[in-house]
Protein backbone atom coordinates (compact mmCIF):
# COMPACT_ATOMS: atom_id res chain seq x y z
CA UNK A 1 0.00 0.00 0.00
CA UNK A 2 2.75 2.41 0.97
CA UNK A 3 4.84 1.31 -2.01
CA UNK A 4 1.99 1.98 -4.44
CA UNK A 5 1.46 5.44 -2.98
CA UNK A 6 5.19 6.23 -3.13
CA UNK A 7 5.33 4.97 -6.71
CA UNK A 8 2.33 7.12 -7.67
CA UNK A 9 3.94 10.17 -6.07
CA UNK A 10 7.23 9.52 -7.87
CA UNK A 11 5.49 9.04 -11.24
CA UNK A 12 3.48 12.23 -10.76
CA UNK A 13 6.64 14.16 -9.85
CA UNK A 14 8.34 12.89 -13.00
CA UNK A 15 5.35 13.95 -15.09
CA UNK A 16 5.47 17.42 -13.56
CA UNK A 17 9.19 17.72 -14.20
CA UNK A 18 8.78 16.60 -17.81
CA UNK A 19 5.93 18.99 -18.60
CA UNK A 20 7.58 22.08 -17.12
CA UNK A 21 10.94 23.62 -17.96
CA UNK A 22 13.76 22.52 -15.67
CA UNK A 23 15.09 25.60 -13.90
CA UNK A 24 17.70 24.26 -11.49
CA UNK A 25 20.34 21.60 -11.48
CA UNK A 26 18.50 19.89 -8.60
CA UNK A 27 15.42 19.52 -10.81
CA UNK A 28 17.58 18.15 -13.61
CA UNK A 29 19.19 15.59 -11.32
CA UNK A 30 15.80 14.62 -9.84
CA UNK A 31 14.34 14.24 -13.35
CA UNK A 32 17.27 12.05 -14.42
CA UNK A 33 17.02 9.87 -11.31
CA UNK A 34 13.24 9.40 -11.64
CA UNK A 35 13.46 8.75 -15.38
CA UNK A 36 16.16 6.14 -14.87
CA UNK A 37 14.07 4.52 -12.10
CA UNK A 38 11.06 4.28 -14.46
CA UNK A 39 13.16 2.77 -17.24
CA UNK A 40 15.01 0.33 -14.98
CA UNK A 41 11.81 -0.97 -13.38
CA UNK A 42 9.83 -1.15 -16.64
CA UNK A 43 7.19 1.33 -15.41
CA UNK A 44 6.56 3.15 -18.70
CA UNK A 45 3.00 1.85 -18.98
CA UNK A 46 2.17 2.94 -15.43
CA UNK A 47 3.79 6.30 -16.17
CA UNK A 48 1.74 6.88 -19.33
CA UNK A 49 -1.56 5.75 -17.80
CA UNK A 50 -1.48 7.92 -14.68
CA UNK A 51 -4.29 10.32 -13.84
CA UNK A 52 -2.06 13.37 -14.43
CA UNK A 53 -2.01 12.81 -18.20
CA UNK A 54 -5.71 11.99 -18.52
CA UNK A 55 -6.48 15.37 -16.92
CA UNK A 56 -4.00 17.11 -19.21
CA UNK A 57 -5.76 15.71 -22.29
CA UNK A 58 -9.13 17.17 -21.36
CA UNK A 59 -10.26 19.87 -23.74
CA UNK A 60 -11.93 22.95 -22.38
CA UNK A 61 -14.23 24.83 -24.68
CA UNK A 62 -13.88 28.56 -24.53
CA UNK A 63 -16.76 30.77 -25.42
CA UNK A 64 -17.77 34.36 -25.19
CA UNK A 65 -18.48 35.64 -21.73
CA UNK A 66 -22.11 36.52 -21.10
CA UNK A 67 -22.89 40.18 -21.51
CA UNK A 68 -23.73 42.19 -18.45
CA UNK A 69 -26.80 44.22 -19.46
CA UNK A 70 -26.16 46.85 -16.82
CA UNK A 71 -22.61 47.53 -17.92
CA UNK A 72 -22.06 50.87 -19.62
CA UNK A 73 -19.39 49.34 -21.84
CA UNK A 74 -21.74 46.54 -22.88
CA UNK A 75 -24.47 49.02 -23.79
CA UNK A 76 -21.94 51.08 -25.75
CA UNK A 77 -20.83 48.00 -27.71
CA UNK A 78 -24.44 47.14 -28.49
CA UNK A 79 -25.01 50.67 -29.74
CA UNK A 80 -21.88 50.63 -31.93
CA UNK A 81 -22.40 47.17 -33.33
CA UNK A 82 -26.05 47.71 -34.27
CA UNK A 83 -25.26 50.64 -36.52
Image: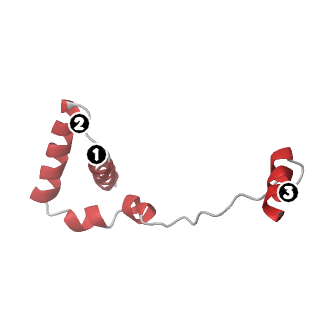
**Label 3 secondary element:** helix
Q: Residue at x 33, y 51 (%)?
A: 12
Closer to the chain start, of discs 3 and 2, is 2
Marks 2 and 1: CB-CB under 8 Å? yes
Q: Quadrant of the N terminus?
A: bottom left
Q: Position of residue 18 (x, y in %)?
A: 26, 50
Which residue in the structure is indicated by mark 2? 27
Q: Quadrant of the C terminus?
A: bottom right
Residue 29 falls in image quadrant: top left
User: Mark 2, residues whose alpha carbon is within 10 Å: few (<14), some, or many (≥20)?
Assistant: some
Q: Is residue 50 left or right of residue 71?
A: left
Which circle, 3 or 2, is nearer the viewer?
3
Q: Distance of mark 1 from mark 3, alpha carbons?
A: 50 Å
Q: Distance of mark 2 from mark 1, alpha carbons?
A: 7 Å
Q: Residue at x 28, y 42 (%)?
A: 21
**Label 2 secondary element:** helix
**Image label count:** 3
Q: Is residue 43 left or right of residue 8?
A: left
> Residue 79 got which mark?
3
Q: Is residue 31 above or below residue 26?
A: below
Q: Position of residue 71 (x, y in %)?
A: 85, 47
Q: Residue at x 30, y 52 (%)?
A: 15
> Residue 51 got which mark?
none
**Label 1 secondary element:** helix
Which circle, 1 or 3, is nearer the viewer?
3
Q: 29 or 77: which is nearer to us?
A: 77
Closer to the chain start, of discs 1 and 3, is 1
> Residue 17 got which mark?
1
Amino acid sequence: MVEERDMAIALRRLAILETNPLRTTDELLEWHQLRQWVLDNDLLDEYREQHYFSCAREVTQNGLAPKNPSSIFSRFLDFVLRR
